[in-house]
Image (cartoon, rainbow, N blue to C red):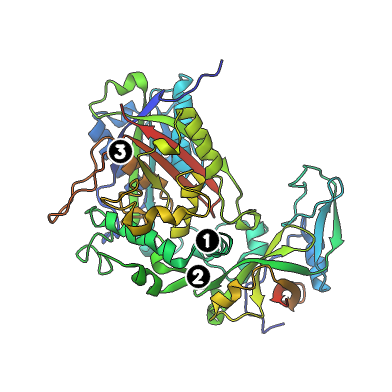
Amino acid sequence: MPSNPSKAAAIVAAAEADEIGYLSNPKTDMMLGIEAIHNVCREAGITTKDIEGIANPGGANSYAEYLGIVPKWVDTTAVGGCSFQIHVAHMLAAVNAGMLDIGVVVNGQAGYSRRSFPRGAAGGPGGDALGPDAQFMTPYGVMGAPSQYSHALTRHMHQWGSTKEDFAEIAVSTRKWAMLNPRAVMHSKETNPNGGPISVDDVLNSRIISWPLNILDCCLVTDHGGAVIVASAAAAKSFRTPPVWIAGAGEAIGHATMLEMKDYTATSAAASGGRAYKMAGLGPEDMEMAMIYDSFTVTVGITAEMLGLTKRGEGPSLFAGGAAGPGGSGIPINTNGGGLSFNHSGMYGMQLLVEAYRQLSRTAEDGINGLPGKQVDAETCIVNGTGGSLSATGTLVLTVD
Amino acid sequence: MPDYNKPIPIPDPFVSKPYWDGAKEGKLKLPRCTACSRVHFYPRIVCPNCGSRSIEWIEATGEGYLHTFAVQHRASGGWAEEAPFVTAYIDLREGDRVFTVLRGVDPAQPEEIMKKIGALCRIEWDKASDDVSVPYWRVVG
């Protein structure tokens, strides 16, 4: 008989690479990922030889080989930035089925360092020359994710009467969180010339990338490595680090290319989120904070609606007047400073996991320079990754005892 | 046409061949399922609506409606010198949707283009090479 896997496993530790952001000395994907695994094992008090299962988008075999381990469980699900939420979901199910007790979800991504790799080493343009993107999309000069996500924001403004100003509030709120996170690229003028506070006007007056998206509506492109350890409920007791329970998990794919997105103001997060809530026996009203993939401001606004945190068409309202920011009147959202202002290496779902763990385990970083820390007092958190072109989603409901 | 400096797609000689053959003649050919009668795009060997593998090709009106758009200020290759330009999704009269570069609108006035969402658009073909014609859409309504 299938059983509800809710809380059959916990995230028991989370860590990052030695340094993240814009690295002055370039590192490879593997270096960043291995640093993160090393750090997460040290934090949790285990060695890499204790790892029984390994998950990474496409690269579980390389990580296992590099570490010299022979995992008995692997997951190479690669559906973009939400892959890590889905890895955790799969690991939860596998733990519940008795297939493993301790696994690691890892990612290393040299989003910035890649620019200085030897020619050819960063990989080719990829894609399938005969696939739908190559035949029916790229002939029109579109370049990268912002050139597609912008169409979704236009449609949101048309369909729901929202404005660029509404979405700019998301960038402003997220920057305020980054200013409390010393590891955030945009923490301050000391960390980056463009760091420190921003206003709605700053967002609206920043360089246009793909109208209606300005550059301050867009995420960073940085280096990052991250890893989390997932352990069975029984094994979690033996860790010195506190468990954050995986109460609910869900996954869904809406489409691959945006050509196939029926409603540009809706993603599969409604489906993956609904399943995560159901497994957890909780609802949006029970969520005390949210970590929502913010590749772009529009991604957050739409996803918040899909997760039931507000009504359809009103996603940005959660951020109005700083409500989702530090000390705000609403639930805290994206407390690390987000992909917008903290760090976005290409697949940001790992950063979501690390921050959600730190917040719920009360190990979020303290502030510096006399600022208050970013630690909030939430005991529940909804985590939603979005991959591809608003394509796939993975949702987790995390709780602490 | 040697003066076409944009990326030229490599026509898929398998699934989408009727589409590209039609394009050469300036005709919009679309795949339609004979089981559920629904048109889909991009072309597939199985209907994404009902799962049937019985697909026929029809000649479409070449008309559709502006669904959403963006103004691209950053672009690659030959498109870089055109920026800013407008990309758009068009709801086809026959059903489903295509992506394109939109003509007949001013990229400097996105708020004005917002008012054109839902407006009638018509296809036009640019001969990119001897073998490939690329469709563009123009707001006419």
Residue drawn 17% across the image and 50% down it: A372
State the image quarter where residue A378 is shown: top left
Identify which residue, B38 or B1, lies in the foreground: B38
The image position of residue A397, as x and y in percent, is 42, 35
Tag 3 residue? A378
Residue drawn 46% across the image and 21% down it: A96
The image position of residue A286, as x and y in percent, is 40, 35
Query: In the structure shown, which secondary structural element does the residue marked by tag 2 occupy?
Result: strand
Q: Evaluate whether label 2 is on the same chain as label 1.
A: yes
Q: Quadrant of the N terminus of chain A?
A: top right
Q: Is residue A151 above or below residue A235?
A: below
State the image quarter where residue A36 is shown: top left
Query: In the structure shown, which secondary structural element does the residue marked by tag 3 occupy?
Result: loop
Q: How many marks?
A: 3
Q: Residue furthest left?
A: A370
Residue A360 in the figure: left or right of residue A73: left
Tag 1 residue? A149
The chain to which mark 1 is attached is A
- Distance from disc 3 to disc 2, alpha carbons, whole Å, reads 36 Å
State yes or no: discs 3 and 2 in contact (Cβ < 8 Å): no
- Distance from disc 1 to disc 3, alpha carbons, whole Å, reads 31 Å
The image position of residue A10, as x and y in percent, is 36, 28
Q: Which badge, 3 or 2, comes first in the chain's sequence?
A: 2
Residue drawn 31% across the image and 23% down it: A236
Q: Amino acid at mark 1?
A: Tyr
Tag 2 residue? A210
Residue drawn 83% across the image and 65% down it: B60
Evaluate whether residue A60 shows in this view: no
The image position of residue A65, as x and y in percent, is 40, 36
